[in-house]
């Protein structure tokens, strides 16, 4: 299974597989798993950052459909540092807002923990709250 995924996708160490939930509302979000070479994948799942066994990867592929590869951009030296960053985070706990799978993938590839999905979610929440406050305040003035 791992060899097939690696060969079909032309994966290289420090590349990231971006996947979407196959069904349901979860399709709007991306999930990220890092390929570190030697048929090894590291993911930040609900139980934290860990090396995925072949059966765990298989289970993920039942629920998630790989949609693209986010290739690592950098030199071989930088690629090696990216792989070391992945291993350095093993055991770190998952946090939806502060350290999810996208934070982890970006940390590995760029050395920066950030999540565009979380930023968008927080922006939408702030805009919604602001709208609600403006609407309530306008109602009280009349």
Image (tube, grey):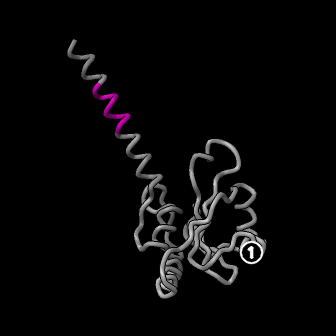
Picture quarter with the N terminus: bottom right
Q: Main secondary structure of the magenta part?
A: helix
Give the secondary structure at mark 1: helix
In the rendered structure, the answer to whether residue 48 lies left or right of residue 5 reads left
Q: Is residue 111 above or below residue 59?
A: below
Identified at 31% across, 23% down, the residue is: 135
Q: Is residue 7 above or below residue 134?
A: below
Residue corresponding to mark 1: 7
> Between 50 and 74, which is closer to the camera in this rendering?
74
In the rendered structure, the answer to whether residue 91 lies left or right of residue 136 reads right
Callout 1: few (<14), some (14-19), or many (20+) C-alpha neighbours within 10 Å? few
Q: Is residue 73 above or below residue 31?
A: below
Image coordinates for residue 138, horizontal then vertical, percent:
25, 19
Picture quarter with the C terminus: top left
Magenta run includes residue 132: yes
Region in magenta: 127-134
């Amino acid at each position: 299974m791992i060899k097939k995924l690696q060969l079909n996708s032309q994966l290289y160490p420090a590349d990231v597989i971006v996947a979407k939930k196959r069904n349901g509302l979860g399709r709007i979000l991306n999930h990220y798993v890092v390929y570190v070479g030697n048929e090894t994948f590291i993911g930040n799942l609900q139980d934290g950052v860990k090396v995925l066994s072949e059966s765990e990867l298989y289970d993920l592929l039942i629920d998630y459909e790989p949609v693209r590869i986010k290739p690592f951009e950098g030199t071989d030296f930088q690629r090696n540092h990216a792989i070391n960053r992945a291993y350095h985070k093993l055991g770190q706990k998952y946090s939806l807002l502060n350290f999810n799978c996208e934070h982890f993938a970006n940390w590995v590839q760029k050395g920066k923990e950030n999540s565009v999905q979380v930023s968008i979610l927080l922006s939408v929440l702030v805009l919604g709250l602001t709208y609600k406050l403006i609407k309530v305040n306008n109602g009280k003035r009349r």
